[in-house]
Structure formats: structure tokens, C-alpha cells
Image: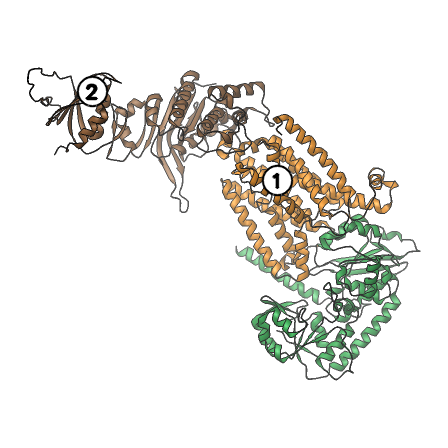
Chain colours: A green, B orange, C brown
Amino acid sequence: MARTLTLLCLWLFTAVSCREELRNAAVPSGNRYARGFTIEEHDGYTRLTVTNPWANARNVTMEYFLVPAEDSIPGHLAGKTVLRTPVGRIICMSTSHIAFLEALGETDRITGVSGSQYISSPKVLQRLKEGTTTDVGYGQNLNYEEMIRQRPGMVMVYGVDSEIAGFLGKFRDLGIPAVLNAEYLEDSPLGKAEWIRFIAAFTGSGALADSLFRSTEAHYLRLAAQAGPIRQKPGVLVGLPYRDTWWIPGGASYMARLIGDAGGHHVARRNSSRESVTISMEEAVGLSARASVWIHTGNATSRAEIAAADSRLSRLPAFEKARIFNNNKRTTPGGGNDFWESGTVRPDLILEDLVRIFHPGILPEAEFHYYREIR
Amino acid sequence: MHIPGEKREGLLFGLFSVTLALLFIADILSGSVLIPAGEVVKALLSPPEAAETVRTIVLGFRLPKAITALVAGCALSVAGLQMQTIFRNPLAGPYVLGISTGASLAVALFALGFAPVMALGFTTTGSWTLAVVAWAGAFAVMLLVLFVSSRVNDNMTVLILGMLFSSAAGAVVSILQYFSSESMLKAFIVWTMGSLGSITTDQLTVVVPAILAGLLLALAKMKDLNAFLLGETYARSLGVSVFRSRLWIFFSASLLAGTVTAFCGPIGFIGIAVPHLARVLFRTADHRRLLPAVLLLGGNAMLLSDLIAQLPGLQATLPINSVTALLGIPVVVWMIVRNRKFATL
Amino acid sequence: MIAQATPYTLEADHLSMGYPAAGQDPGFVRTGISFSAGRGEMVALIGPNGSGKSTLLKTLAGFMPPLGGNIRWLGKALASHHPRELARLISFVSTENLRIPNMRVADLVAYGRFPYTGWLGRLRDTDLDMVRQALTKTGLELFAHREVITLSDGERQRALIARALAQNTPFILLDEPTAFLDVSAKYEIFQLLRQLASGEGKTILLSTHDLGIALREADKFWMLTAAGCFQGAPEDAVLQGWLNHLFDNPHMGFDKKGGDFFFKTEQAGSAHLSGNGEGLEWTRRALTRLGYAVVTAPPQEEEPGPGSSTPTLPPALAGKSPQPTISVIVAGLPPDTLEWNLITAHGKEKFHSLHALLSHLREIPPHP
């Protein structure tokens, strides 16, 4: 019995410390912020890697070798995943992939999407209407036949957990080239945006990607430099509860970074989680007392709607006291939010909105990109 | 219309064999992409002549799916029949021993990211990992059940323990779900909806033999199943080694149900409804006839479900689990209402 | 194939049986059981409910493990018989009420051939023959294609026995085969079993509460009572008074003459009974029911004579009984000419039916 307990403890300890390992992974050389991919130029081919492409993956690296269409495939790449560039037709399983391609001006390649009701990109929506792009479904409803019919040059997929391995196997079986993207796992906003370079490798738009990213980065850093020195940081409450649980961004998460960079103070227990954490309603009451700004209130467009979602919320100090903003200015009828689509590519625009919210006045007057005020 | 016994049986067997073949063909002919029948035939019979996409769709997608549907339907129905007879309970099914919940629990532990499990250093090699994990879960439950059944001499107790374990595993899965993020949750739930189409061709080379093995074992134990119909006392008095026989039958059912769950997710109702349908149609309690009948009907049912799930002509597809439930429940209800000597088996 | 190592083909020797206590269940254990049975004997297992009859049958058949002692079938220990072997030796009929849809009587009876058929269970001609014979012996030839569920209790019981017959074993164990049957069915079953024992040399062991029939038809009694175990001929059980141990009830007694139990009622008096013919015994029973201690005596002469004096009660038979309070004389022959003459302290009366006599007697105040 004692032995089992000791083993169990050792196990748990290893598990916890492994988490640390993940967090401390260094940014690969060649990238400025993104941890999840690498691009290596070689003679006659380019080697791309994606590391740990789903939450809780450990020691998983996917390799993709890009060989220009007019060249022959080097012999030592036999048996590896080789894609010819520029890839022809592309199927995107996530809206952020669409955003990257749109920024690169490559929406004409997109023949397949997943979840068309969530897409904000006007170009792709137009293509859907015309029928040059079709919805291939998702998850269990993945329309393999349609995907085969399109004969895509690549399918950009993302895996939430290891069950993606099942889909990857099926894709391989069917001869469909699938590439795992993992931009959503980056906790740094610029790191996420930097994935444009990864995607550009497939379309042969490396130079364009670099230049777009540099300008995004420059804008972002400028804004951060403006907001950074301001000593008076408003307390920021994030999100809405569901039943009794309130998910708020972890201390080291994407949202928390944005808030910090915009000169806000995310009210939460200090933690270093890269993912969301839960707090109880009671804790939320305490936190909200310190908040003068409340953002990301679900689907609400008015205070009345917030109160309707959960009547207890109207009793929170923040309900009356705080200024409330929601990131649902650009939503689709089907429930999609451009915040997560083009916002992935342009974190500088999100940052601009946040700086306007936290420190009104330091930036010239302009419309919000993704946010709206909730009255 | 009352046709005398044997002739009727012969007719039924013939009829359902024909429908099986027809449904199999129909399943391969239909899908979300419209392919003319001639093209499909070409892809099947002389692959090099067919267009590449047609070839990939038919041979890489539709054919494996149809084969999976066929063997899964057979496997689940036979497992269900065995469970209903051994436990003398008309509501028993292939999952009554907790096989599918065991598989779900294993998948949940793995997929929903239970850290210590991750710490075991799971590396994902291809599409097998999830299936192996689910299979391991199903087998762990089977071992547990076999162990319990060897200690406990009473079928009712084994049944109750199986159901309790099922509930316990389900509770743990709920906890894991509660603490996981939205998208992980969705991925897990999608798994539970069942899928016949995600099997790869090399996975088939494992699934089909495993199910065949389970079916052969079931066939070998047909006579013993008949004895179990009379109850354990009579079975014993007829010379059946109840303890050993039960172990083999549980092993067979676990192999059948576990394999299907591991590779297709949990697919319900086929295992419960088809044996009853067979009993009503073939009017026999003799497993030497029921087993083949259940095999035929099970294959038919699953192929039909898959056909319906594809919503031929429409872009979307339905999850297979919903279709089997929607088909299976009315069948069971109709039988209960119509056949009031349904008191026991 | 019957070995003749000992005269007994079935022996239980200092057997302990039952199941140990577990949790709330107090368990049941019985020790020191020693019984035996021989070829061609029909043995009735008698005992109150809860005395372990079912447990004994199941233990003997090998369905439950014994807790101690020995069981020998044909001289060979039970444990050394393979289950397949045992199935060709012993067939069992249990109390379970089988309700299986879609099973025909012929199918049910065919189960009896289970230990003899291959893995597919195919019935050869010999097997079919046995099934047919079994159906004939139990009078179920016409029922062969009826569904088991449609049978009455008696018919189903017969079908189960037919199944045991088809198994063609030298031993047949039956657990309360007559429990839910009507009277005529009970007799039929006993008759059938009787025939199997004496005619075919099978050893039949059945537990039953139908004491009356068992007393007549069984060759041997095995009795399980609180006071201990007894085995012997039914008549031994009567004469040696074991039957009184069946009930712990002081108000019940066993009528050795009539061969069954009765309730002891309050003493109503002493009756002097005389007469001849069949009516005598039944009048005795009726008077006993009313509570009279009956003494049967030779017919008494009636004194003729003019102006007959009040008839008198006969004197007490020397040394045999107290002074009778009533005297009943039975005369005539059933069914039409029976008559009863009642002499009491109040006088003499004649009755033409036993019911009338008894009604009258009930109105007489009991003897102080």
C-alpha cells in the first residue's frame, strides 16, 4: 500500500513538473515569438516542424517537407510528408487559417472550409455563395468524400487533443495531405500572429508574410510602449460565468498578455497558467470589486442581457461601477466572431482597442475594431 | 400468413441475405459526392481504370466504411444476444458489463488530458493510439468482469456489478468533462457519437480478424447458450461447466463489443434491438438458429443505419449513434407492445 | 451401466450441507445427514419447509458444494465424477417456473439429449426416439408442437419430467414436482414415477409435501426434521412415530389408522362405536373430528321386548376406556341404506346421514 502511494506521488510529481517543462520551452531561432513551429531552408527543400500541436502533447513533433513543384523530390525524403509548393487548393478547418490566407491574399486557393456559419471573411463568404468553396463539416461529420473530390494540395487542421491523430491517420489513408496548425496554443499574441510565416511557406509568400508580420509587430510594440509607462492601471474583469463556474484567462494566457500589454491589470489570483482557470462566484464578487473595466461578457450586447444571463451578476459591484465592453462587434449570424479570425492575424488592432478602453484619451479618436461598449 | 416452421426459416434467411447484399451495395453507391454507379463498379473491379478521386473515395472511404458497418452490426448483435441469454434479461445489451464505459473512461482519461496519464509519456504514433487506448479500457473492464464472475457464482450479481461499474466510470468521465475546456469536451463528445467512417484500411486488418475471432467463439458456445436459457441449475444438470462456459461467453462478448467501441466509438441499440427482432421474426429460442439470424439482421441493420446516416443527396451526415437509436427504439417498443409474452426471454 | 459394489446406488454419509452466513443472511447449515437409496427405489424426501430439502437435492446433484462428509453415486465419490458424466447419471427437475417464448414442448424435451450430442447439438435418430418415448410416457404426444408458454402448470411439469426422461439417466431428482398441481395431476405424476422406478429400475428421489400419496406410493422415506434425520419405509415412519416430528404443533396428531394428520380438538367425550361395513371407519373419523375418543366394539344386541325400556349406554369395556357418553351404531350399506343409531343419556335417535348425526351431536353440551 505504501509502495503504491509512493509510486502515485512520484507519478503526479513528474506530471506537474512536465507542465513546467512545456512552459519554459524556448522560442526557436528564426522565430521572434512563436514557439510552436520552425522553418528551415535546405538545398532543394524546406523543412517545417510543428511541436506539440495539441494541448498536453509531449515530445510530439510533426515534420513537413516542402518541395517546389518544378523540382524533383530529393531521395532522402522518401517516406516523409512532402508537399509540393505552392500548394494548390487548400481546405481550412479553422477560421484563423482563413484569416492568415486572406492577409496573404490567397483566399482564391480556399476550396473547403469547416463551419461556414462561423466565417467572417467577406471574400470567403462570397466564394461560399458562389460555390467555389464548400463546407466540409467537422468532427464526426467530416465529409471525406467531398474533401477527396476537391483534390486539395493541403488541409490545414488543428487538433484539440490526441483524437486528431485518428483523423490524421484517415487522411493519410486517403492520400489527403494534412498539416497540423497550432497557432491557437501560443500564449503570446505576437507569437500567434507569427504563424503567418508558417502558412506563407506553403503558398510561397514568405516575403509578404515577413513584411506583414513586421509591420504588425511594430504597431503592436508602439502601442505597448505608449500604454506601458502609465502607472494608473485599471482593474479588468474578464468573462461571464456559466452556472456556478467562472472561467477566466490564466495568468500567462493570450488574453492576460493582451491586457497587460494594453496597460490593464487583470484582476485574478496570481497564477501562471497558460490556459483558462476557474473561479467560484464568491471569488468573482471579490475580484469584481477591484475592477473598473469588465470585458468579454459572453454574447451580451446590453447590461439587461447580462442580468438576464444570470441575475446574480447584476449584484456584482462591477455591474454598476465598471465600464463594460464586449468583443462581439464583428460577429456572424451563425455565432462566429471575427475577434478570433482576423484578430489572430492582427493582434495589434485588438491591442489598440484595449488601450482605448483602458486609457481613453491617449490615442486619437477612432472606431473600435472588435469591441463595443455595453450599456 | 402462417408458413410452417422450417420453410419459413429458410425463406427468412434467404430474404435477409439478399437484403444484406443489396444494402451493402447501396451503401457503397451512396455518399455525399455523387458518383455514377458505373464508375463505382469500375473502381471496385478494375481500379486502374477509374478516376483517381473516384478510386480514393470508393476504395479508401466507402468500402472500408461498408465493411465496418457490416462487421460492427454483426459483432454488436451477437454480443447483445449472448448477454440477453446469459443474464436472462431482455434489456441487456453488449454494453451491460460496462465494456463501452470502460472504453469511454480510457478515452476520456487520455483525451481530456488527465495529467498523470500524460506523464506516462504517451507518444502518438498514427491513428492507432486512441483505438488502442479504448481497446485497453474495454479489456480492462472485461478482465474485471471475468475476475468478479469467477469469484461470484450468481449471474445477477455479475450483472449488477457490471452496471455499477458502468455508472462509476461514467461518473469519473463526467468529472473529467466538467474540468476540461470547451473544445476538448466537444472532441470527446464527438467520439461518443460513434463513427463508422474514420477507420483506416490497416485498422481494418485488425478489426475484422478480432471480430471474426469473437464470432467464432460465440458459435462454439451456441449449445451452451441454449442451456443457459433454462437457467443455471438446469444448465448444470445438463453437464455444462457453467463457470467456464460463462467465462468464454463473456470473453467473446467483450472482444466483440470492445473492438467495435475501440474503433467506432460506442454505438448503441443495435445490440439490444436486433436479438429481439430475430426472436420475433424467426420464432425460435434455439441459438443454433438465432445466432445466424442475429448475424444477418445485425449486418442489415447497421448497413441500413449507415445508409440513412449519410442522408443521401444532402451535404450533411447524421451521427451513427442517433440513427441506430432512432431505428432501434421504435422496434423495441413495437415488440414489447405487440408481443406480450415478453415477460422473460 | 450400474455398478454393484454396494447394494446402495446413492449414498450420503455424514453429509454436512448448506451455505455459510454472509452479512445479513444467517446462512443455513445442516450436518450429520446419512441417507441411502437403491436401484429401482422411489424415495420421498419429507420435511417441513426450510428443513433443507432443496439444498439436499442440489448438494447431492453437485450444484452446491458439500461442507463435509461424503456423497457417492454408484459407489464413486461425487467429486470424482466429471460434470458431463454426472449429466448422464442424474437428471434434475427443479421448481423453477420456466417461461421461455418460442420454445415448443418437443424442443424442451429435446434438451434432455444435451449431454449426448456434439457441439452443434444435432439430434440423431436415437435421440429423436428417446424424445418421442419421453413424450409418450408423460402423455404429451399431442403437445409436441405446442409452445411451452401456453401449457398449464401440470402440463409444464409433465414436460419438464419428460425432459428428464429423455436424458435417460438411472437417477432422477425432482424438487417438489407436485407442488402446484391439482389432485388428479398429482396422482398422475406419482404413478408415472412409480412406474419408472419399478418398471425401469430407475432410482427416483423427490421431495414432496403430499404426504398422503407418498405414504402409499413411495418405497422409502428420507425425513429431515428438527429432531433429526430418519430413513426407512413409509410404514416405519408411521409406526415409529417420526411423522409427529414434522409439526411442532401440539394440536396436531397423526392418525395411524387413517394414515394422515388431524387437529386435536377439545375432548367432547367418549364414544362407543359399533357396527359393520364401510361406514364404520368413516364414522370413526367424523366422531374424532368432533372430539370424541372413539372405542370400536363388537355389535351390541338390541334388546327386544314390549314397551322397550330406555336403551342404555353400554357399559365401559373392561379396562379399555372410560364410560362412554354416547354410543353410535352403524348399520346398512352405502350409499343408500346407511343409518346411524345414536344412544345418549337423553335417549335414542336414528339418522339417515352422517351430517345430520354430527349436527345433532354438536348441539349436545360437551361432557363436563
Q: From the image, tell me which residue sits under label 1.
A: B79
Query: Label 2 amino acid?
Result: Glu
Q: Residue at x 41, y 23 (%)?
A: C189
Give how far across and how far down residue C158 sits, in percent. Answer: 46, 25
Please tell me which residue lies in front, C360 or A38: C360
Q: Residues within 10 Å of mark 1 (few under 14, many from 20)?
A: many
Question: Element under label 2?
Answer: strand
Q: Residue at x 48, y 18 (%)?
A: C1
Query: Is C282 on the left or on the right of B63, as rendered?
Result: left
Q: Amino acid at mark 1?
A: Ala
Dot 2 corresponds to which residue?
C339
Q: What is the number of the mark on residue A257?
A: none
Does residue C287 appear anywhere in the picture?
Answer: no
Give the class, few, some or many, for how many residues have Cα within 10 Å of label 2's Cα (few <14, many ≥20).
some
Q: Residue at x 73, y 39 (%)?
A: B23
Tally of numbered tags: 2
Residue pushed farthest right?
A70
Could you say where residue C343 lies in the image, as x and y percent from the top left? 13, 24
Q: Which chain does the numbered disc 1 sit on?
A: B
Quadrant where the C terminus of chain C is found in the figure = top left
On the question of residue B209 being in view, the answer is yes
A320 is higher (above) or lower (below) than C99: below
Q: Secondary structure at mark 1?
A: helix
The answer to whether B78 is drawn above or below residue C281 in the figure is below
Residue A118 point in image, percent of width and height? 75, 62
**Foreground: A334 or A349?**
A334
Q: Position of residue C30 (x, y in %)?
A: 36, 36
Quarter of the figure with residue B84:
top right
- Left or right, A230 with respect to A70, comes to left
